Structure formats: C-alpha cells, structure tokens
Image (cartoon, rainbow, N blue to C red):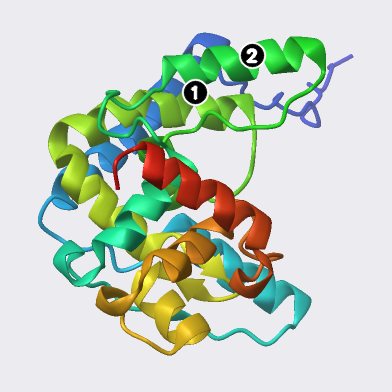
Amino acid sequence: MTVTPNTDTKTPPRRIPLRSLIRWIVIGVVLLWSAAALTLLAARWIDPPTTAVHIQRRFQARIHHTPYRERYKFIPLRQISPDLQHAVIAAEDSRFYQHHGFDWHEIQIAAEDDLEGERTRGASTITQQLVKNLFFGTGRSFLRKGAEASLVPVAEFVLGKQRILEIYLNVVEWGPGIYGAESACHYYDETAPRNVGREQAARLAAILPAPLKRRPDRMNKYSAIILERMRQMGW
C-alpha cells in the first residue's frame, strides 16, 4: 500500500531571534538619538519651526474635536526685555548660568522632599525643559527622563546658554495655543516683549508651571515671590 505524504502540514512561522530583535531596537534608539542630537546642532543656527509639545496639542485638539488656534512667532533674544528674561530664570531655574544642564542642588532638595512625602518643587532646569519641549512633549516616564538626560549635555555644548534661553523663551507653552514670549505678551498684555516691565514679567513667568490653568492676572502670590527672587539675584 502506498502511503501518501501529508501535504497539509503548515510551516511554523519564522521567529525573530531575541538577539536580532535587541540589536534592531538598539540600532533604532541610536538612530533616533542621533537625529535629535543633529536637530540640536541645527538649532544653533535654525529656529525650530515646531516642537513636540506643539504637535501634541494639535493632535489632542483633533482627537477631542476642540477648537484650537496656534500662536507662535520666533523672535531674537534682544527683542525680549531683560525683565522677562530675568523673571523666567528666577521662576524656573535660578542657577541657570551656574550649572551645566543639571542643577544637582535642586535635585538633592527634590529627592529629600520625595523621601519625606512633601514634594513642593521641581528640579528641572531650563535646558531640561527645552529638550523635553522639543522632543518629548508633556508625558512622563522613566524612559523619557533617561532620553532627556542624555540630550541635555548635547544641548549645553552645542547651543550655549544664550541660545538655550532664546529658544526656550520662544517655544515654551504660555497658554492654550500660545507659544513663546511674542505671542504671550501680545495675548495677555497687548504689548511687545521688549516693552514688558518687571511686574508684567513676573506675572507671565508665574504661569509657566501650569500654563493651561493659570492666568497672569491671578498670580499675585507667585509673582511676588518671583520679584523677590529677582531682587535677591541683583536684577
């Protein structure tokens, strides 16, 4: 009797070896990191046309079917009043000109507060916030923090303090669809950034930690703290 071979046997799907999968993941991560580093290098001369936060807000508005108007205009640092520059530094990163991307003193204080369950302040520097704005949006995760931390020294090295401050003041979120000092000053005070005084500057800086919830005219307490910090810093 002739035995007919079973032709219905299916070939099992080919599995990708774990080692190959890991290799491709590593290659992908390196390529993404390199692209971000090259973007930072280009930002030394080219003003960012958009950021991850800008894209995130557009996407969220579309998903939730909410009205969205984006205001964003990049201007040179010289067109932003020193009072506004100083107020933002006093509010967000008082040792901006002393550290190299990470404020270890603030990190230590934040860590101690975490251990005591009394976290009242953040430890992110302006450089860290700029990297987050450009590449990662507003989400939080240990993976994002690690990627952010690896790019902060690159930003400090290739951009320098003044360019970091210039880009940050131009791209940071100052309200729903409001990005940068130019848009914020015109929207809230109907004036140009070069004309903003100390009181106005402190109120604008006070909304940066929660720009979607705060408004300058309600920032009496926080703006007073910022003005006092500016005075202590000799500004």
Can residue 21 be seen from the camera position used here?
Answer: no
The structure residue drawn at horizontal position 71% and vertical position 65%, both measured from the top left corner, is: 213
Quadrant hosting residue 122:
top right
The structure residue drawn at horizontal position 54% and vertical position 32%, both measured from the top left corner, is: 144
Horizontal placement of 165 versus 58: left or right? left
Mark 1 vs mark 2: in front: 2
Disc number for residue 111: 2
x and y percent of residue 63 in the render? 72, 73
The structure residue drawn at horizontal position 64% and vertical position 71%, both measured from the top left corner, is: 215
Q: Name the residue that disc number 1 marks.
A: 146
**Quick check: 106 above or below 56?**
above
**Quick check: 10 above or below 223?**
above
Which sits earlier in the primary sequence, circle 1 or circle 2? 2
Horizontal placement of 188 versus 85: left or right? right
1 and 2 marks in contact (CB < 8 Å): no
Instruction: Report helix, strand or loop for mark 1.
Output: helix
Q: Number of labelled discs?
A: 2
Query: 10 Å neighbourhood of mark 2: few (<14), some, or many (≥20)?
Result: some
**Quick check: 24 above or below 122?**
above
Quadrant hosting residue 93:
top left
Instruction: Report helix, strand or loop for mark 2.
Output: helix
Compare residues 142 and 128 and report the one nearer the observer: 128
Compare residues 49 and 71 and report the one nearer the observer: 71
x and y percent of residue 73 in the render? 31, 78
Query: Hey, what amino acid is under mark 1?
Result: Gly
Mark-to-mark CA distance, 1 and 2: 17 Å
Query: 10 Å neighbourhood of mark 1: few (<14), some, or many (≥20)?
Result: few
